[in-house]
Structures are given as structure tokens and as C-alpha cells.
Image (cartoon, grey):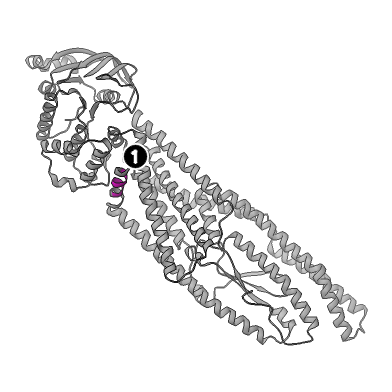
Amino acid sequence: MIAFLRFEWQRLFGEKKNLIFLGFIFAFSAYFVWSGLNEYRQFQAEKKIFIRFEKEKTKQIINYMQYGAFGFRLLYETSPLSLFFVNSSVLQDVESNIDSLEAIKVESSFKGKKLFLKRGYFKDFAGILFIFGSIFMLYLGHLSLVSPAYLRFMTGCMSLKKYYCLTTAARLFWLNLFFIMLGLGLFFLLQVGGVVFSGSESTIYYLYLFFLVLLLDFIYLLGQLTTVLVGFRKVFFLWIFIVWFLCIFLLPEINRISVFNKSLALESAEKINLDKFHTLMALEKKFRDYLKINPDTSLNQIRQMQKKFAVQFINNSYLVNTGLETRYLRDVKNVISSHERQSVLFPTTFYYFLTGEISGKGYYGYLDFMDYIIKLRNRFMQYYLKKRYDSNDAMVESFVKGDENIFHSRCRLPETFWIGVFVMALYGIAFFVLAFWRLHRLVYLS
Amino acid sequence: MITLKNLCLEHGDFFLHNVSLQVRSGEVYFLLNRQNLGNDFIFKVLSGFRAPTQGDIYYDEYRQAIAGRLLPAVFIDKVIHTLAYETEARIGDWIDFICQCGNFSRENVLQTLMVLNFNESNLRKKVRDMTPEILKQVYLALTLAPDHPNIVINDFIKGMEKSLEMKFNKLLWQKKIAGRAILYLGNDIIYAAEIADQVGFIKNGHLLFEADAADIKDMDIKDLYYKFLN
């Protein structure tokens, strides 16, 4: 094994082309981590301004009626780990406004600097390693076995099986070491630079790195298999592109289209808003009808009636509306779960899903955010109605205590993580065995 | 000692029927066959990459039956394309690696390279940058390094420069003197007369004629060629 490790080290790192490519991967990964760090720091600075702004805004509100109409904004904050995945997230920088209106708003701002924050094209640590790492591994998988004539020659020294296994193991050992060192190096560099990761975040990052390395190994084995399947012919470079395109772009895109198609079965969000609006209007109509029947009602009586209707609203219509929203979220969750199950079936599609979730701005992050909004809104509505009808126009006191208007999204591993690892391992083993079977035929029977 | 017993082969148009022969220690046996593809196939069978349709092959007491089994024999194939050996390692590192894999001494390889007048500066070159001549020198040195008692060669001198061919002949001579049994597969009757002790002619799938090389030199080679190889 030592001889193989030494020889494959020389093959991999004694080659200028490989060194340039590895250097390129290193430089770009470091750049995108740095760029992610900048974004993270900028977000932290803006968060402070956001909190100050919200505090000052509340001070300017005259009464609770106005407070209910304006409400307060809720900011979505991800963990520092997201700086590795700034571009892999499902959601972008989002915020919500919690007020007494019936619609729940989740929006993204394109104001000022954010207008120029062009995302896309895998521009983050996770994306760079995925795109360039995969093409590099596919290429190295292609080069690993050289040719059938070379293998016939090598079988003079040892069995084909031993040579095949040891060559693959030695090459993967060095390549994995490079990617692990790169990932860990940048992770620790960030910590030295003052970014604090919690224990669970570190564990998630290590598991992500583990998955990434396995994914790259899977692609390496795929490259090896493709070469063997096309009989080491030089038309391989066409195949390398086809296989790469299929795995990296086409299958994930098909998966995305599939989830989109599934999401078409969901009711329109506007329809939900309209239903909620109708529920609210039905109550208001009752109130207006009462005033029409009793036009001589005194102001004090009207105020009492308003309070009564408010209690009725909280106990009936609001519950109905919250129920509508919760049911809608449950439907969305079903689509997400089905998307997750589908993504697990192929390693690259699962990688997209995984990085989205680890970023803290994935599908489950969105569900958590919506859940937090609904809960916070419930409390806000009760607070608002109580204060509005009981406070007798006292000074407006902010509902937000501490950093309640910051939603701390946690980075997470999907529940299917280990299934994804297992499926990938199965693919890897299948490719490894299939390549050997075909190779044996090429070397011995051609 | 290399022994073929009632060997039958079939591969496309080529076939061999009931061929039996024996190459004793310290002897070079030249098996002449007009068809290059046929020689390639016989070589694959002898080196264990294909199984014979019928019959047995023995290297000393070892029966060649299992594909991929390591045998007490050296198999030297013809080397035409450098492309097939295109690896990113340096020649020196490649030699070290193969020596470690095959458990044989680097000295053996270097000694052969010296006989072949190999330029030492080439050791720093990449394997994929080797010229066909350098590749043949390195290939030969590596295959001969284990120093097994039996050697099977498939038309190695084909396309080789005369100077290198002479060095190769010298190596063969050394091996023969050292008591190795050498079976050479080829189609060059003049070369056969030059290096072999025994020559066997294959025609229409049969071993038609066996003769001492010394006798062949006295025969009309043109006549032999038309009779057996045309």
C-alpha cells in the first residue's frame, strides 16, 4: 500500500496540470469563504441598525391602533455556518412584517447594496467544490487506470484485482486528504478570524465535509466506470462532459422541476389570503349590520361592542385563519418531504438539498420561520387587542422583548442524511464493482 | 521449461489445432506464424489472459489454467503505442513503484537498462513523454527484472531500431546462457534463423515443421518462406 500511496502521490501532485487545478480550487474556495464572511459581517452590522430602527420606530407610534397597523418587522438570521453556503440556500435574505392584517408577508429586499449582490452560478464554498471538484474528480477517475495494455503489463507484478483496489484506494486517499484539509483549514481559519461556531454547528460542518468527500469519491468512481465502459477510447472527453452535465445539472434540474410540478397542486397563497380576508370581512359585516340596526348606539357602547367583537375575533375568525395558514403550511411541508425523499435517490440531487438545509435557509428553515411567524403573530394579536381596548390610549409599549424580532434559523442536517450517505455508498460500491467487472473483461477477453 | 500439450485455440479466423511443443532450459524456440493477430492471440493465451479451447500449457511444473495467476515466466509483449503507457509519473518513480509491487530488485532493472545503453537522464522524464525506443527499453528492463526461468516474447523487435535490436539479442543471449527457456512468437524467418535454436512453422493452424535453426541457415530461406509462411 505504501508503494501505491507514494506512486499515486507522484502521479497526482507531480503533474503541473493537477497542481494548477487544485490551486485554482483552493484559491476560489478561499475567496468565496472570504466573500461569505464579508456578507455575514455586513449582515451583523445591518442587524444592529435594524434592531435600532425598530426600537425607534415603535417610539414614534402614537397609539396601539397605529401599532397594530404598522406592526414590526422580523428579520431572518442564519448561523455563521451559512457563510459556506451563501449561494446554496433556498431562501435569500428575507424578512417579514408582523401586524394585525390577515396576510403573512415574507419578502426579500433589493434595496441599496443588496441590488448588487448578484447570486447564482454556485458562487460559494459548497458550490465551487461541487462544480470544479466534481469535474476534477471525474477527470482523475478517467486517468487512473491508464489503459488495458498498461494493466496487462501491471498484472505481471500483481493480480488485476489488487492493482485496481490499491490504485483506487491510494488515489482517493490523497484526493480526500486534499479536500478535507481544504475544508478544515478554511473552517479553522475562520475561527482564528473571530467567527464562533457552536458545537452542533461544528459537528454539522464535519458531517457536511464527510458527505462532500464521499460525493467526490462517488464522482471519481463514476469517471473510472465511464472510462472503462467506453473502453478507454479517446472519445471519452465527450462522455466526461455528458456524464458531468447529467449529474451536476440535468438530474438536479429534473428534480427541481418535479418539486415545482408537485407544488402546483398547492393552493395559491393569494387564495389563502383571500379566504382569510373573507373570514375577517364576515365578522366586520356583522359589526356593521349591528350598527345599522342600532344607529343610536353611544360611543362608549360602540367601544364596548368593538371589544366584544375583538374577543369574538380572537376566539373564532382568527383561529379559523390561523387554521387555514397551518393547514397550508402542512401541505407545503408534504411537498418538501416528498422532494427530500426524491432527492435522496441520487447523490448530486441530495447535495443540493443538503447544502440548502445546512445553510439554514433551506425548506425546513422556511417552515420554521413560518411557524415562528404564526406563533409570534398569535401573541402579538392578543397583545395588540388587549392593549388597544384596555390601555385607554396610554403610551405604546413595544411588544418585542429582547431580540424576538430576529428569527435565528439553525443550520440542520436533513433527517434523511444517513440514508443519503447510504444510498451514495451503494452507488459507489456498484460503480466500483461494475468497473472492475468490465475492466476484467477488457483486460482478459479483448 | 515451457511445454504446450495438444493446444487448440480459436479466435475469429485464426485457429490452432493440436499443437505440442517443448522449450527446454537454455533454448530459444521461435514459433513462426504468418498471422500477426494469431501471434497476439497465442501470446494472450500463453500469458494467461485467454483460456485455450483445449490442451495444456506448463511452465516448469505449473499448469497455466487460471486467468491472472502469477506464473514463473516473463511475458514480453510487443510495444507499439506509447499512448498505452501514458501515466503522469516520472520514469524513475515508475520503475521504483513496479519494483516494489513485484518485489524485485531495482538493480536488476538498472543492469538491463545499462545493457540497453539507457541514458540515465531519462529517469527524470515523465512516462508519458517517453519515445517508443525509451519505452521499449524501460519495458524490457522491467519485464526481465523478476528473472523467471521461462520467457515468452511476442514479436518484440517489430519496428525496433537495429541498434536496439542488437542489444535485445545480446540480452536474449545472456538469458539463454543463464539457462532460461525462451519461446519467441513472430513472423520473421531471417530473425528466427539468427536467434533461435529451434524453429517451428505454423500453417493452417497446424505445427507443420520443426527444425534446428542451424539447419535452417543451410536451407533455402526463400523456399521455406513460400512453403510455410506465404
Q: Which of these two is toward me, A131 or B118?
A: B118
Q: What is the quadrant of the N terminus of chain B in the image?
A: top left
The furthest residue to the left: B218
Indicate left or right for A376 with A250 as reference: right
Residue A100 picture location, percent across and down = 73, 75
Q: Which residues are magenta?
A: A4-9
Q: Which of these two is toward me, A281 or A80?
A: A80
Task: Please say whether residue A85 is one of the residues in the magenta stretch.
Answer: no
Indicate left or right for A112 with B68 as reference: right
The residue that mark 1 highlights is A233
Tag 1: amino acid: Arg
Q: Secondary structure at mark 1?
A: loop
Residue A432 picture location, percent across and down = 43, 40
Q: Determine if residue A125 is in view.
A: yes
Image-quadrant location for residue A369: bottom right
Task: Please say whether residue A7 is one of the residues in the magenta stretch.
Answer: yes
Chain of the residue that carries numbered disc 1 in the rendered image = A
For image coordinates 21% across by 21% down, the residue present is B34
Q: Which of these two is toward me, B157 or B92?
A: B92
Please say if A221 is above or below A103: above
Image-quadrant location for residue B109: top left
Indicate left or right for B125 with A385 as reference: left
Q: What is the quadrant of the C terminus of chain B in the image?
A: top left
Please say if A214 is above or below A118: above
For image coordinates 52% across by 55% down, the residue present is A352
Indicate left or right for A87 with A315 as reference: left
